[in-house]
Image (cartoon, coloured by chain):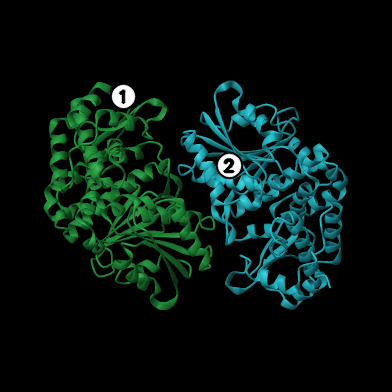
Chain colours: A cyan, B green
């Protein structure tokens, strides 16, 4: 069984400049609205259309400077900002000030330890402890300020506190802006598996202030770009080509170009999520490179590599395998490799990984349903992919053999 | 602001016998289907209509004897039965056998300690531990076998495991059959408050085998009957009068009469839930007697009295207060007291409770939103009630004074 999806099938027009990219017509699932660029006014807004759970993603510079936009999405008179020890000294005061402006909202805060190793139920309880200690009721709003871990934990806390309170996301990493802020996946890890305890829960809005990227370390920035490249590869050839042309501006964190990259990524993810909110089919294509990547993350030990770094190598391997299968012409794998390298992302498998390690770890991958390993592989012209178990296993072995260090 | 609700407004016909009660026409929210009474075939089915989350409640004798009905609602090929140490020796084998029949479903089990004091996140983790240890995937079904605590915990575990798996309820107490099995409220307690962490999550079906009531202790049985009386008082005068006529048969646990009582209770709750799934308005009326009752439960220490016992006294106090306010004629309070007494439920406030204790504990009640205590009080003819803060506080003081032991 194959799940095939191409951006052209969704009516995304061919575009050739960042300007045109911005005003791209998206006929379903997502509405992109142009708006004037000024302080505290978003340069772009992506509406994630999910019926009565539809919400906007505001993207732009200086959005945290004024509180109007944020407060519009806080319906009650209390809020709990959840952040971590790294982000708190940088942006917590600014967010508390934005929420407190006008004096109508009582703002509480909780600062969690930073890192994936703290994404567990014990740390989650600190959010509930604080909320109850501050006597926050069902009308309160939980505000996630940070990267993917904070977003996932705060979202699950919001889904579960008194059976569900309001939720707003303020992502401060590229990864959180282009990936975890869209789709409603929330949760924590269990010792036996990542994200094993969680909920699908949508925010009332996502506020992406691109100014927060100024403090993001280079490795973190590049890691997020791996997901941006992914959207181009799985369904949006025009976006991939736009990235090829704008890679220098993206690496220089040029404000307008960064806004466009985040916007287009969110549009792509939002479309896929709208088609498949609970991950039955096409949503799996968002995991391009992730099966190889998860094996690398696990194989070298979590925390050694950033998620996007592992996904980068995973995408290189998926593109290589697709080419060996004869499903793409050779330019696709080469261009994928070139673009990821320009983003300073790793494209080689770490030394410690053997073929056996890959095979063992990929076998337990969640996607290995009913004993058959399904992979997302590229197929046809740039921007096309399939999610399939229908491939020659010898080709997978060839790819592993080619990439594992001898 | 008052939220008024009467059964007549929902088109429930006047009926005068258990037979007629069974075939009552319910034009909205709920469909009651007659079906033949035979082993493993439900004597009654209540459809809880919630759009794409609509599910049936099957009620009858011998439903656990055959597994067809149960397995119809287990879509994958694995199930995890969650129960407690009290229920496991009585019914776990029977449920495992019913699920395993035919050999298509791998059945895992987890037995939790019994009691409200174990309804917490630590014990909840045992369910996740077991599910992961048994490698249960997203297509699995969690089956709750037990009373309200097991139902609430298993439901929340099902809502959260891998962001949501299938859920089936097999309640074994009257309380769970007529109250917690309808409405989708799931969750666990936090040291700072009951049910503070949870989700709204609907089961795929509820299977009420009335044979399981044969092992239910008398106090537990009576406690559940308090909620049955409640449905009559808040919105269904005909049901209240039917209970008055059938109280002896109910106390004798007469099979057919018990089925009718559970069915009509579920219909009433399902209608209210369909009108107000997330508890914005009329759903609050289900808490008749609960504000007084919670104060009693907390005042004497949780676990001393059963929930329904505290609610029984709470309903007596609410009826008394309604009469003092002149909102009902005196027969309503008297009939309420008489019926509860016939069910062997307590109708007097425990000795340790003072007026001050009541006032302090009622003030922190969740319903005390914005500093104004709102109560569910009876109003008008039997079967009518309001949820209101608009009452003379001196009358509340009079009721407290009348019921507290001198």
Horizontally, residue B160 falls left or right of residue B193, namely right
Q: Chain of mark 2?
A: A
Q: Secondary structure at mark 1?
A: loop
Q: Position of residue A272 (x, y in %)?
A: 65, 53
- Badge 1, how many Cα within 10 Å: few under 14, some, many 20+? few
Q: How many marks?
A: 2
Residue at disc 2, secondary structure: loop
Quadrant of the snapshot with the C terminus of chain A? bottom right
Q: Picture coordinates of residue B360 (x, y %)? A: 33, 29
Out of B48 and A103, give the one closest to the viewer.
A103
| The quarter of the displayed image where residue B63 is located | bottom left
The image's mark for residue B390 is 1
Q: Would residue B46 be visible to someone looking at this image?
A: yes
Q: Quadrant of residue B258?
A: bottom left
Task: Identify the mark at residue A203; answer none if there is no mark.
Answer: 2
| Residue at image coords 79%, 54% | A237
């Amino acid at each position: 069984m194959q799940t095939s999806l191409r951006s052209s099938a969704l009516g995304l027009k061919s575009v050739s400049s960042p300007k045109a990219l911005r005003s791209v017509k998206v006929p379903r699932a997502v509405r992109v609205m142009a708006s004037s660029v000024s302080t505290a006014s978003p340069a772009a807004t992506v509406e994630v259309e999910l019926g009565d759970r539809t919400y906007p993603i505001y993207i732009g510079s200086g959005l945290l400077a004024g509180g109007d936009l944020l407060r519009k999405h806080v319906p009650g008179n209390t809020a709990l900002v959840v952040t971590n020890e790294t982000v708190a000294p940088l942006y917590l005061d600014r967010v508390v000030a934005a929420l407190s402006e006008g004096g109508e909202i009582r703002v509480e805060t909780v600062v969690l330890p930073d890192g994936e190793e703290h994404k567990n139920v014990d740390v989650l309880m600190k959010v509930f402890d604080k909320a109850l200690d501050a006597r926050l009721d069902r009308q309160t709003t939980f505000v996630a300020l940070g990267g993917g871990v904070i977003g996932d934990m705060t979202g699950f806390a919001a889904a579960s506190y008194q059976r569900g309170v309001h939720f707003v996301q303020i992502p401060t990493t590229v990864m959180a802006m282009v990936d975890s802020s869209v789709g409603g996946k929330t949760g924590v890890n269990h010792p036996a598996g990542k994200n094993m305890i969680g909920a699908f829960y949508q925010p009332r809005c996502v506020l992406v202030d691109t100014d927060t990227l100024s403090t993001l370390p280079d490795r973190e920035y590049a890691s997020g770009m791996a997901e941006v490249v992914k959207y181009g590869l799985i369904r949006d050839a025009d976006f991939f080509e736009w990235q090829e042309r704008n890679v220098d501006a993206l690496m220089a964190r040029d404000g307008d170009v960064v806004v466009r990259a985040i916007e287009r990524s969110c549009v792509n993810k939002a479309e896929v999520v709208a088609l498949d909110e609970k991950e039955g089919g096409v949503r799996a294509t968002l995991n391009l490179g992730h099966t190889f990547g998860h094996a690398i993350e696990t194989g070298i030990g979590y925390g050694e590599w950033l998620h996007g770094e592992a996904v980068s190598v995973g995408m290189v391997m998926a593109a290589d395998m697709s080419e060996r299968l004869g499903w793409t012409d050779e330019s696709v794998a080469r261009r994928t490799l070139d673009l990821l390298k320009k983003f300073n992302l790793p494209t080689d498998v770490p030394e410690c990984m053997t073929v056996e390690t890959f095979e063992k770890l990929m076998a337990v991958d969640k996607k290995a349903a009913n004993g058959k390993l399904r992979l997302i592989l590229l197929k046809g012209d740039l921007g096309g992919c399939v999610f399939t178990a229908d491939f020659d296993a010898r080709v997978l072995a060839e790819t592993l053999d080619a990439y594992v260090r001898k």
